[in-house]
Amino acid sequence: MDLLAENWIYLPAFVVVITVLVFVHEYGHYKIARLCGVKVDVFSIGFGKELFGWYDKNGCRWRISAIPFGGYVKFFGDAGVASNAREEDELNALSAEEKAVSFHHKKLWQRAAVVFAGPAANYLFAIVALCILYLTLGQAHTPAVVNEIVPQSAAEEAGLLPGDRITALDGEEISSFEELRQKVVVGLDEPILLDVNRGGELLELTITPKVVEFKDGSGNVQKIGQIGIRSTQREFREHGLGSALISAADQTWFVTTATLKGAWQMITGARDSTELSGPLGIIKMSGDAAKRGDDLFGNFLSLFNFMIFVSISLGLINLFPIPMLDGGHLLFYALEAVRGKPLGEKSMEYGFRIGLTLVLMLMVFATWNDLNKPWIKDFFTGIFS
């Protein structure tokens, strides 16, 4: 029971993270749908049985449902929560007034805008949240000046020396070690061309990071690239609104590209697919984030930063061209634009079945990964021992 008392925060932290981000995502769909004149029947946070809800002045049922692993917006004309259309005969039988507010009778660009708005809202949330953090607290960074070289490291082999200032990576200017670390950690052992200022002398050095394995706070073994540089200099960069927006957009872009690169490395075998986490892993990471600070504000700030990362991931995943996801709908709309007419009912039905199968397989695989991670065993052993 002591373990439960210590870790009670895990489920509430997860519920807060998923509720906020699902609301942001679905509100993006809802808002653009309303601007396009679409009637919204249901706005649901969660799936399954409704716990409580209410109607707004436009007749939309806002509801909180029992299973907190997502949510949906159901438009007028939808047959189900996946925004698949009713039978063609049913859609054709609608009155002129009903067709005017039916999602499936809107122009192609309007339907695409409504679908794209969900992932876009997640990205907008991340950029705005990071911008607020940078404006109020500043942006922590470490000047790209080498203080210490780890013996027998990639940095030593490349010829880096204490006092060197790294000014560019593969031709792109940098000003902090955080920018270098981002490229190294995700790139694993990909060679990097460094521009180095050594006491006024400009040098070009090629460094090949070494791949190392480490255990994170959940006991997961992960691979990262490492070059063996240490620096003790820590500063906070102040931002105005313009520079805060640029830095927030840059950080959001980095998380997006790093996620895609990590996924590709798993597909090619360069990175272990056991690093992939499912719902149980997100619960664990949410709770860990909520406990990471030194005080209540620090805990909130840590959880807020984690929420930003998850928001970007949620927006990106939903753009994958898989039926059942927003990206799958956008793929169908792209085919409709090329063909000049929508895909047939059978093609759409098979597409959604394939998409559902892929999503379920991914969920099962990710959950299996979670169940085989050390912290699961430790958690349940602690509860029942």
Image: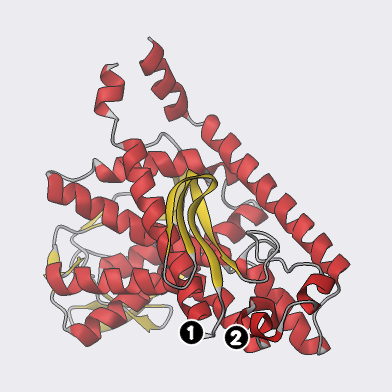
Q: Which residue corresponds to the image point at 28% horizontal and 36% vertical from the top-left? A: 9
Residue at label 1?
A: 35
Q: CA distance from mark 1 to mark 2?
A: 9 Å
* The one of 216 and 32 positioned closer to us in this rendering: 32
Q: Secondary structure at mark 1?
A: helix
Compared to residue 291, the image places residue 133 above or below, namely: below
Query: Which one is in front in this view, the residue at disc 1 or the one at disc 2?
Result: 1
Q: Say what secondary structure mark 2 lies in.
A: helix
- The percent coordinates of residue 148 (x first, y second) are 21, 57
Q: Are marks 1 and 2 in contact (CB under 8 Å)?
A: no
Q: Nearer the viewer, residue 32 or 10?
A: 32
Quadrant in the picture for residue 104? bottom right
Give the farthest residue toward the top.
Answer: 385
Find residue 250 and report its horizontal and vertical position in percent. 36, 76
- Residue 197 visible somewhere in the drawing: yes
Please state which amino acid type lies under the numbered disc 1: Leu
Does the image show residue 229? no
Quarter holding residue 75: bottom right
Residue type at mark 2 is: Gln
- Looking at the picture, how far across and down is residue 281, in whole percent? 46, 41
Kindly identify the residue that appears in the image at 65 percent across and 55 percent down.
Answer: 267
Q: Reading the chain from its start, which is encountered first: label 1 or label 2?
A: 1
Residue at 57%, 38% in the rendered image? 367
Q: Nearer the viewer, residue 352 or 168?
A: 352
Q: Residues within 10 Å of mark 2 (few under 14, many from 20)?
A: some
Left or right placement of residue 192 versus residue 367 in this view: left
**Residue at 39% in and 38% down:** 284
Query: Residue tagged by mark 2?
Result: 110
The reply, left or right, for residue 277 in relation to residue 193 is right
Q: Position of residue 346 (x, y in %)?
A: 87, 66
**Residue 265 in the image: above or below residue 339:** above
